[in-house]
Image (tube, rainbow, N blue to C red):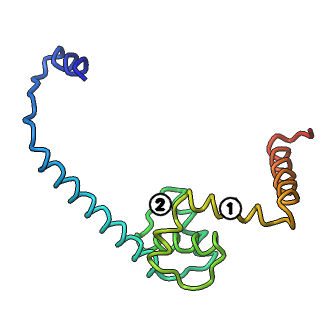
């Protein structure tokens, strides 16, 4: 840190030392920021859950506009996120804000995918063989070669 300060000062910039703050003030600010972050997350989850359902065609249109960096409204983004959640979990009903909050995390999606893969076979060994065959097919398709 001091090396950086020395380099900045060497360029001719004026360096001032910031005053220290009371640790209680810092903790109060941290608590305030956490509450604001939680409120924003809850508002986002509510917005996604209450956004209108969209069709496959409209979702693809939104996807293309996002890929091309074209303008997409916030409501369209929320509807697109809702569409992706509904399709990922094959969930046909309305979703709640709690569903959005709990099940849109990448780690939760990975657990769901792993559980889905493990239950594809009648036994764990059979499921693992199916997973191995699937991965082998994927790699041979990508690399274009046989093993």
Left or right, 58 with respect to 146, comes to left
User: Residue most toward the right?
Assistant: 146
Tell me which residue sits at (20%, 21%) in the image: 5
Q: Position of residue 54 (x, y in %)?
A: 56, 79
Disc 1: CA contacts within 10 A as few (<14), some (14-19) or many (>=20): few
Quadrant housing residue 117: bottom right
Task: State which tag comes first along the sequence, 2 or 1.
Answer: 2
Tell me which residue sits at (85%, 47%) in the image: 136
Q: Eyeballing the image, is 9 above or below 31? A: above
Residue on which the image places disc 1: 113
**Secondary structure under the numbered disc 2 in the rendered image:** loop
Q: Which mark is residue 59?
A: none
Disc 2: CA contacts within 10 A as few (<14), some (14-19) or many (>=20): few
Quadrant housing residue 10: top left
Q: Position of residue 131 (x, y in %)?
A: 81, 55
Q: Eyeballing the image, is 126 above or below 60? A: above
User: Residue most toward the bottom?
Assistant: 93
Front-lying residue, 84 or 94: 94
Q: Position of residue 143 (x, y in %)?
A: 82, 40
Q: Position of residue 112 (x, y in %)?
A: 65, 64
Tell me which residue sits at (52%, 80%) in the image: 95
Left or right, 138 with respect to 68, comes to right
Closer to us: mark 2 or mark 1?
Answer: 1
Left or right, 55 with respect to 71, comes to right
Instruction: Indicate the quadrant containing the C terminus: top left, top right, bottom left or bottom right.
Output: top right
Left or right, 61 with respect to 137, comes to left
Between marks 2 and 1, how big is the CA–CA gap?
31 Å
Tell me which residue sits at (11%, 24%) in the image: 15
Instruction: Indicate the quadrant containing the N terminus: top left, top right, bottom left or bottom right.
Output: top left
Residue on which the image places disc 2: 70
């Amino acid at each position: 840190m001091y090396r950086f300060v020395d380099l900045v000062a060497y360029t001719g910039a004026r360096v001032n030392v910031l005053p220290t703050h009371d640790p209680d003030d810092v903790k109060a600010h941290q608590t305030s920021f956490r509450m604001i972050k939680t409120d924003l997350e809850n508002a986002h989850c509510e917005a996604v859950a209450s956004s209108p359902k969209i069709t496959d065609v409209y979702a693809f249109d939104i996807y293309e506009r996002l890929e091309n960096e074209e303008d997409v409204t916030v409501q369209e983004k929320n509807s697109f996120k809702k569409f992706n959640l509904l399709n990922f979990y094959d969930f046909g009903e309305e979703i709640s804000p709690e569903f959005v909050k709990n099940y849109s995390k990448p780690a939760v999606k990975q657990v769901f995918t792993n559980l889905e893969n493990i239950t594809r076979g009648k036994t764990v060994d059979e499921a693992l063989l199916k997973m191995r065959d699937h991965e082998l097919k994927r790699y041979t398709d990508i690399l274009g070669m046989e093993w």
